[in-house]
Image (cartoon, coloured by chain):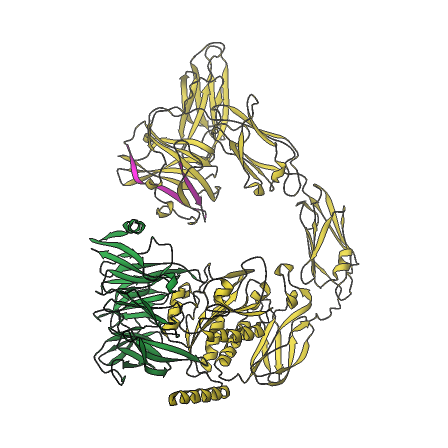
Amino acid sequence: MKRVLLISLMIFVEMFGQRVTVVEDAAVTNPREGSFYYPALSPDGTVLIFSTANQKGLWYKNLPSGNIVRITNQLGAGIDAAFESKNHVIYKEDNFVQGRRFSSLKSFDLLTRRSTILDRDIRDLKIYRSYENRTGTYFKNNEIREINSPSLSKISSNEILAYTENSQIVIFENNQKRMIEPLGKGHYIWVSLSPDKTRLMFTFAGKGTFVSDLKGKMLNKVGYANYPSWSPDGSWVVFMKDIDDGVKIISSNIHIANLITGKYFNLTSTRNDISLYPKWGKDNSEVYYNTDKGQIRKINLKIE
Amino acid sequence: MKKIILLLIGLIFLSLSSSNAQSLAGYKFCINPGHGGNDSNDRQIPLGNGINFWESEGNLTKGLYLRDMLEALGATVIMTRTQNRTEDDLPLSQIVAIANTNNVDFFHSIHSNATGTSARANYTLILFNGTDTAPTNPAAKEMGAILAQKIFAVNRTTSTQNRGDRTFLGFNLGVLNGLNMPGTLSEGSFHDYLPEAWRLKNNSYLKHEAWAIARSFLQYCNAGTFINGIVAGIVRDLNETVPSSYLPIGNDVKKPLNKIKVRLEPGDKVYNGDEFNNGFYMFDEVTPGNYQLIFEVDKMRPDTVSVTSVANLSVFKDRLLTLNPILDPPQILSYSPADSVNEVSNVSPVVIEFDIRMNAEETQKAFSITPEVAGSYKWDTDFKKITFTPSKGYLPGTKYTILISTAAKTHFGFYLQQQKSFSFTTRSKLNLVFTYPKSGESNISTSVLMRLKFDKGIDGSSMANKITVADSTGIPILLQANISRYGEGIIDFEPKTQLNNNTTYTITVKEGISDAEYVKFTETVTIEYKTESRYTFDGNLIEGFESGNLWQSPLLSPNTIGVNTSTTNFTIATIRKRSGNSSGRLNYTFTGNSGEVELAIINPINLGQSSSAGFGIWVYGDNSFNILEYRFLRSGSTIEKVFIDTLNWTGWKLKKIWLNEIPGSGQIEFKSINIVQTANGETSGTLFFDECISNIVTDVFADNSLPGEFILEQNFPNPFNPTTTIRFSLPDNRNGQSNLLQNVSLKIYDMLGREVSTLIDEEKAPGNYEVKFNAKNLASGVYIYRLQSGDSHSGEVFIQSKKLILLK
């Protein structure tokens, strides 16, 4: 009953005829199960993967059953872990030897709960993860490779990718890499392609988050918006507004912004804890995030 | 299995080759110079004379040096910032994202530390993510241990620690939490320990720490060692010390020397020191071997020492230099107080400055003051300046003579050749230099804020029962005082309840008030003033200053000019009010000499056409002698500026204007209250406003009772331009008869006695009167107004004159 009462204290706002309501903000994990960060939902919405604050280790929760299973406890496993297919999670494991990072690329089968090494001893390994946490590509020393190919060969499709190299944005299109710096020299982080692959979202460190076309022409300034990600229909962005005192983060809320109307909405204004690292769920009605204490939570939204 | 063996062989080969090759090729590091910009959160340490240390600057300098060193070793370095602007002060989550996005092998954040309290410390601290025993990434703890040792070795702090942030701080550092690679944060030393803050102003000192971090990277990566070494040290004065307020640790008690010159031979390398009180020097990339260091500092005895440079290490040669002997007798360069000066502060120290370092003990013995006064001596850090401070002040009005005998001698044993004496006379008494009201002043507000100003700051403890206010029957008035300006010698006080109208009050200031220099007020003074008559009128209250929404911020008005924007503001205040719950409070500060503040009402108030009705506002004056104006819109377009009064009062007064006195024609709308700076006005003040009243239909200054005597009041405002008001009273019951008509004339004369205007020349009944005088056709100057009243029955005549000043 108490929960029902709390839920009835729903937050809503009118926006150009749109009404956004936080229907529910519910815990997905509890402290007994561990301290988890960086939730990411499978494309079919049945499995949630997550890691720890330092992206050490990888776990998944089967949402229908509620079971949490550890995939690995290795360093770096939480970095851009993503779904290659309904039952396969692609992740990496880092090993630091004499100051150098060596990484292995692995695939975890959710049905057999077994891992397979796909590639190993890579000095600069990055997994390419799409807005819906899907992957089929990885980077081996800045060389683009396909994951689903038996030989893990160089990619040669017409895939469009957006990612970073040395803090610059790289657009891979028509089988060619193109470097862009829409706002000049600096650090471009949290770069992602829109679901329709026509727009680019990125954060320019110290300046804010922006949306541009693939040539770097500015379309939207989202403002101070960290860890931004696209909604499944590409019309919204969810992000965190974290404030620090130069030593630690002292407050943070999860916000969404509509890229058409330019309106913002704080989804966690009534919560007292620090809310971090949000990701959309399978449609516009779900947002997953974690608290600073490491609890994964899910917000159910109603956008009318 | 075969692959693993090959990898291990490769790594072993890599390890062996790198230790020889001294290379970091293929490594990618992220370096974060902590903080950014020169904002309040960027750790500023004021060092005096406008010199500051900013941690954000020190961190950046170390970081840029480190980048160059690591890149020279072949590493790829990602810098989170390369400048020190506010926009470079990135959110912690973005710093972490930069390191993660670039997939670097190691992250390091560079800082200096502070206790944040009055306690002082200076140790080296390295932090890694996790607890002491369970680091999130063991490699971070491994590197932390190396950094702790290497940085400690170059900064020579008191100790060093390598700690998990969760254990040491009780929480995870935001800049380490979230890294997906090993990361460390170094607090090389403490910047709020002032000897260290001065060292951190030295770029070579910062570079030295960068070398230590670069050495750490080489060792952590097992990538060889630097083939050259560093020779460094600090040059100090053997005899001088730093201020004790530094709370110096160890050798830091000795004063470092500025503008040192150090030569390294062979090689003819020269290091020129800075002027930031650190005495630091450094020669880096010195080929291992034996050298000579030659130290040269102006006025100091040169010094030479042997040193052996060792590869990948810092070798220190600190030196304590002594002054070149000076074989001259000392000269007195200056002294204070100056000779034969009177009215010297009763706590003024005696300061004598010599040109040569003195023997403190002998020189103190050579000092005498007559009459004798208890006090203490203090020398500055180079023993050239002695200061004698009396412990409880001097006697008031007393002549003191200082004598420095020829027993005073220098540090090198040379005596003062001629004795020196000078004298001064102390202040004899505390003086009352200003009062409000002035004695004899009338027309004072019944809520007057009285002020006494002395020529020195007041000792509050001497004030008990020293100031009283009583009415004409001797009944004391309850007062409340503002003690916040005692230090300026200002005592503001006001009646707890409103005074009576048309009543004489007396302020008594008794002898015995003491100032901060133990000097007393030696007389008893009375100040008599009379409150204004009672206001009676009819009108409509149109704005009560109960809400700030009706008034525009003065800073938004285009007519507000020449003000300090941080101290000029308008608020609704409850601390003073004439009615209701609040009043409007206008604080203003002028920055130049022609400022103006406009407090505009957002929707101008329609007052109708010109008429005999009035418009007024209750104004709590600030005695600033600036000008109060009202501004009106005529016909919705023309702005008419109307002088209302000079702000020469305190307490509430109704400041009104008749609508037919407002120039122009057409509909009148009240638009704003303006404060216009004057040449002799205060540069800051606070006014309160309450009750805007329209349709004032009777004369506002009316006393129900008929006067009992002739009164000619001082005109107001005075000085004026071009209108002023003159009030006078004609008594009733003259010679036992009531309500007799009297012949009255009120005329204006210039200083040569020529009549320039007649304001009244007619018979008038007993009563209180008010006459406006418009001097628009007269030149600036001093004029006389004279009231003459003749009783046609008795022949008795009353004549009184006063001066008025027209300033155009």
Q: Quick check: is B584 in the magenta stretch?
A: yes
Residue at the spot 41% in from the left edge and 83% down from the top edge: B26
Q: Quick check: is B694 in the magenta stretch?
A: no
- x, y (%) of residue B381? 67, 62
Rendered hue of chain A is green
Vertical relation: B77 (above or below) B428: below
Highlighted range, magenta:
B582-607
Image quarter of the N terminus of chain B: bottom left
- x, y (%) of residue B616? 36, 32
Image quarter of the C terminus of chain B: top left
Q: Nearer the viewer, residue B26 or B191?
A: B26
Residue at the spot 45% in from the left edge and 23% down from the top edge: B728
In the picture, measured across the screen, residue A186 lies left or right of residue B245, that is left
Rendered hue of chain B is yellow
The image quarter in which residue A124 lies: bottom left
Vertical relation: B470 (above or below) B230: above
Q: Nearer the viewer, residue B738 or B254?
A: B254
Vertical relation: B355 (above or below) B726: below
- x, y (%) of residue B52? 53, 62
Magenta portion: prevailing SS class: strand
Tell me if I can see residue B202 in this picture.
yes
Q: Nearer the viewer, residue B72 or B720?
A: B72
The image quarter in which residue A87 lies: bottom left
- x, y (%) of residue B717? 44, 33
The image quarter in which residue B689 lies: top left
Tell me if I can see residue A266 in this picture.
no
Q: Nearer the viewer, residue A91 or A12?
A: A91
